[in-house]
Amino acid sequence: AKAPKRVAVTGAAGQIGYSLLFRIANGDLLGKDQPVILQLLEIPDEKAQKALKGVIMEIDDCAFPLLAGVTAHSDPMTAFKDADIALLVGARPRGPGMERKDLLEANAQIFTVQGKALDAVASRDVKVLVVGNPANTNAYIAMKSAPNLPAKNFTAMLRLDHNRALSQVAAKIGQPVSAIEKLCVWGNHSPTMYADYRFATADGKAVKDLINDQVWNKDTFLPTVGKRGAAIIEARGLSSAASAANAAIDHVHDWILGTNGKWTTMGVPSDGSYGIPEGTMFGFPVTTENGEYKIVQGLEIDEFSQERINITLKELSEEREGVKHLVG
Ligand code: NAX
């Protein structure tokens, strides 16, 4: 049997945690033959720690055959010890009267501390996915705070945007999502992201030709995908949780186990591809193999796409500027 992998999850008593942990323990993240140990972090607050204990009681009650252990933590230095995978879900939500700047700063502090802790105690190959918002900038801060770990191992979640785009395109052309390939999302996990089906195929046919409607793209598709998070809050009274957990599972599963040549979307530190400044945590089309991702190269960026990419890049650059004094 395989040795267990250690999966650290922050914000473990939150909404997304409640959907995520059970699927990890069920083998959906790393495969049905891979035992896992869950190392769960919550804030020291008494209520949060108590809620975490309750979640662990339920995990116990599932008697997952692949679960080799589960521990509760209030300190990232113990939660991240020897972690092979770190899912950074917990973040500071925007409180009443909080400015965007305050939100960025509060989160910058959390992700500086957590980046340093990963640097100090995690496996030297730890693969990190940041879900907590602002996800790209938080991932950038964690990466910058962990100089002894490979920068390429820090990623941000764009997969929910990718999956939302997939499902909208599939509905538009009346085909199953499984028929669609080569879709991607560029940029920031925010309403500025640019979901791009110009290269997509469905059963080998060009999706662009099947849709053939630039007005739909601009006035329906992009706003629907971009504002989907807000639409779910409006309908459910709570933000996306099960779909966010599912996207986190997809992201890490595909990163570790490979996409067999197929494209997906990951937020990764730019290597300068497509003129995105090096280090910027940016959504790109990628393929993955043997636990490594590669940015898909050589795609033509037309004028409309360049405009969209510039908008989302500008937003990310501003976020980065806003936390510069904290990260250097
Ligand atoms: P919840 O508020 O339900 O849960 C967050 C949990 O994190 C809380 O239990 C809190 O105590 C904990 N937490 C806060 N700071 C922490 C810290 N420093 N260390 C450890 N735990 C900490 O939020 P939930 O709905 O689970 O969402 C979590 C995050 O995901 C939010 O920042 C949210 O904005 C973000 N999202 C990101 C998405 C993406 O696509 N990248 C989509 C879904 C989601 O909106």
Image (spheres, rainbow, N blue to C red):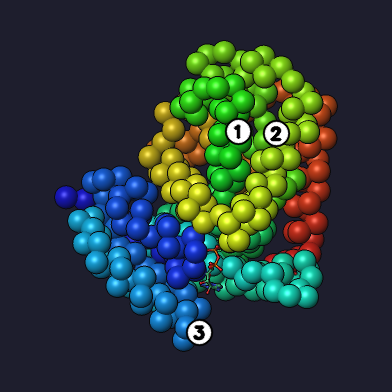
How far across and how far down the image is residue 248, in percent? 48, 50
- Residue 159: in sight, yes or no? yes
Q: Alpha-carbon distance for marks 2 and 3?
A: 41 Å
First reached walking from the N terminus: tag 2 or tag 3 = 3
Q: Amino acid at mark 1?
A: Gln
Amino acid bearing label 3? Asp
> Where, by quadrant of the figure, is residue 146 drawn?
bottom right
Which amino acid, by three-letter code, is at mark 2? Phe
Residue 45's label in the rendered image is 3
Marks 1 and 3 sit apart, C-alpha to C-alpha, by 40 Å
Residue identifier under label 2:
221
The location of residue 253, given as percent across then percent down, is: 41, 44
Mark 3 lies within 8 Å of ligand 1 (Cβ measured): yes
Q: Name the element at disc 3.
A: loop
Q: Label 1 near label 2: C-beta < 8 Å?
A: yes
Tell me the crowding category of disc 1: few under 14, some 14 to 19, or many 20 or more residues within 10 angstroms, Cα based: some
Up/down of 32 relative to 110, above or below? above
Q: Nearer the viewer, residue 294 or 35?
A: 35
Can you name the residue that lies furthest to the bottom here? 46
Sequence-wise, which precedes: disc 2 or disc 1?
Answer: 1
* 102 with respect to 205 (left or right): right
Q: Nearer the viewer, mark 1 or mark 3?
A: 1
Residue at x-position 47% and y-position 79%: 48
SS class of the residue under badge 2? helix
Give whichever of 255, 230 is nearer the camera. 230
Q: Which residue is mark 1?
A: 168
